[in-house]
Amino acid sequence: MKQCLVCDAAVETFLNLGRMPRGNGFLRPDQFASEFFFELSAGLCAGCGMVQVRNPVSPERMFHADYPFYTSTSARMSEHFRRLAGELRQWCRSASPFVVDIGSNDGTFLSPFAAAGIRHLGIEPAANVARAAVERGVRTLSQFMNETLAREVVAENGQADIVFSANVLSHIPDLHSVFAGIKLLLKPQGVLVFEDPYLADIVAKTAYDQIYDEHIYYFGAGAISRLLAQHGLELIDLIPQPVHGGSMRYWVGHRGAYPPAGSVAERLAREDELKLGRLETFERFRERVERSRQALRELLEKLKAQSKRVVGYAATAKSATVLNYCGLGPDLISCLYDKTPVKQGKYSPGAHLPVRPDREFANPYPDYALLFAWNHAEEIFAKEGAFREAGGRWIVFVPEVRILD
Ligand code: TYD
Ligand code: ZN
C-alpha cells in the first residue's frame, strides 16, 4: 500500500482504470509510437481523508508549452469567471489592491481586473496559454506555483488582497508547498477563493471521467479544512457551483481573520452523513463505474450492429478516461468534434479518434452524438439545436448512460 501524497498515512485504492494516456495528450500519428501511458487508479487516504490519484504524472509532463486547454473556449465559463471577478472587486478596497490567480490559463478571470487597472498577476506554467493571457493585457508569470515562487512574488509586489485559483489546486501534487505559499501571499485580511470539482458531486453522479492525470486530488470540505489548519488558514465559506458538473467554491482566510459562515459546519456535517471519508462509499462508486462502462459498451455495440453513425462531441480531457477505460475505438465512435483549434486535426490520446472542427459536425450530421462535455450540456444543446431537429440524438453517460429524447 502506498503513502498519501498529503499526510504519509496509507491510501486504499478503490478504483483501477487501467493503462491511461495523458488526458490532454492530443497527438499526431507520428507520435503514436512514443505515446506516454501510465496506470491510473484512485484511492482514499485513511489518515487525512484526501481522495487522490495513486500514481501522479509529473507536472512538467502535463503543463507544457503545448497545453491544449483554453478557459475561454466555453462562453459559459467565461461568464462564470467574469461574474466572480465583478463580485471580488469589492475586496479590492486597499490603497493599491493586488490580485493573484494561480493557474491563470489564458487570463479569462484576470482580464476584468487588468481592464480596470487593478494590480494583478497570473501564475501559469503552460507557456502557450500564458502567452495568450499576456496578449490580452494580463500580467503573467509562466512558472509553477510553490512556496519559493510565493516568496518572490511578495518581495516584488507585496501581499495580495485576493488569491484566486480555479480548477488548478487539485492539479498540484505538492499541496503543502502551495498552501504555505498562499499563507505568505495573503495580506492579514486577504482572502483565498478557489474552486474545483466537488467530490460529493463526482460520487453522486458517478462522474468517473473526472479522474485523469491532471486531477490528482478530488476535494471535499473535510479534507480541505484539515489541510488548511496545518497552514494557519481556515474555511470561511463554501458555495456550491453548477460548473464542471458540480464544483465547490472555497473561501479561505488566515485563522481567526473572519468568522466562518454557517455553511462550513453544515457542509462538514453533510459530508459525514454522505460518508465521504469512508471506503465503503467509494467501493459502491466503483461498482457503479463498472456498470456504467458495461452499459455504454452495450449501447454502442448495439448501435454499431444497426449501422448507426456515432460521434463524440467535445474532445475533453475527461473523454480520454471514458474512451480508454471503456475500450472505445474508431469502430464504435468515428471521431470527436471540438472547437479548440490546437486539438483539431490531431488524434485523441490512447484511443486515437480523429478530432475534427465542430463546424463540420453538421456535414452530415451523425445519427448519435455522445456528449463528452456533459458539464457544458446547456451551452452545447443551445448551440447545436439543429442536430436534434434533423433527427439526431444525444447520448450521455453521466449520471447514467442514456439516449436523450
Ligand atoms: P471541459 O469540460 O472544460 O474539458 P476538460 O474535460 O478538458 O476539462 O470542456 C472543454 C472542451 O470542450 C474543449 O476541448 C472545448 C470543447 N467544447 C466545444 O468543443 N464546444 C463547446 O461549445 C464547449 C462549451 C466546449
Ligand atoms: Zn492523507
Image: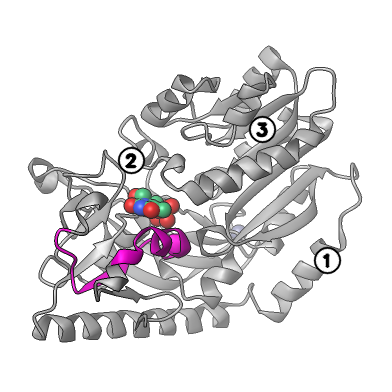
Q: Residue furthest top?
A: 156
Q: Amino acid at mark 2?
A: Pro
Q: Secondary structure at mark 1?
A: helix
Q: Look at 38% across and 42% down and name the residue there.
A: 69
Q: Is residue 181 above or below residue 360?
A: above
Residue assigned mark 3: 181
Q: Which residue range is magenta in the image?
A: 363-386
Q: Is mark 2 within 8 Å of ligand 1?
A: yes
Q: Secondary structure at mark 3?
A: helix
- Residue 371 lies in the magenta-colored region: yes
Q: Look at 49% across and 67% down and name the residue there.
A: 43
Q: Look at 45% across and 48% down and name the residue there.
A: 74
- Residue 238 lies in the magenta-colored region: no
Residue 173 percent coordinates (x, y)? 51, 46
Residue assigned mark 1: 265
Quick one: quadrant of the C terminus?
bottom left
Residue 308 percent coordinates (x, y)? 13, 78
Q: Amino acid at mark 1?
A: Ala
- Front-lying residue, 277 or 128: 128
**Mark 2 surroundings within 10 Å by alpha-carbon count, few (fewer than 14), some (14 through 19), many (20 or more):** many
Residue 67 percent coordinates (x, y)? 34, 37
N-term mark: 3 or 1: 3
Question: Which quarter of the figure has residue 311?
Answer: bottom left
- Front-lying residue, 45 or 171: 171
**Mark 3 surroundings within 10 Å by alpha-carbon count, few (fewer than 14), some (14 through 19), many (20 or more):** many
Residue 192 percent coordinates (x, y)? 72, 41
- 3 vs 2, front mark: 2
Residue assigned mark 2: 68
- 1 vs 2, front mark: 2
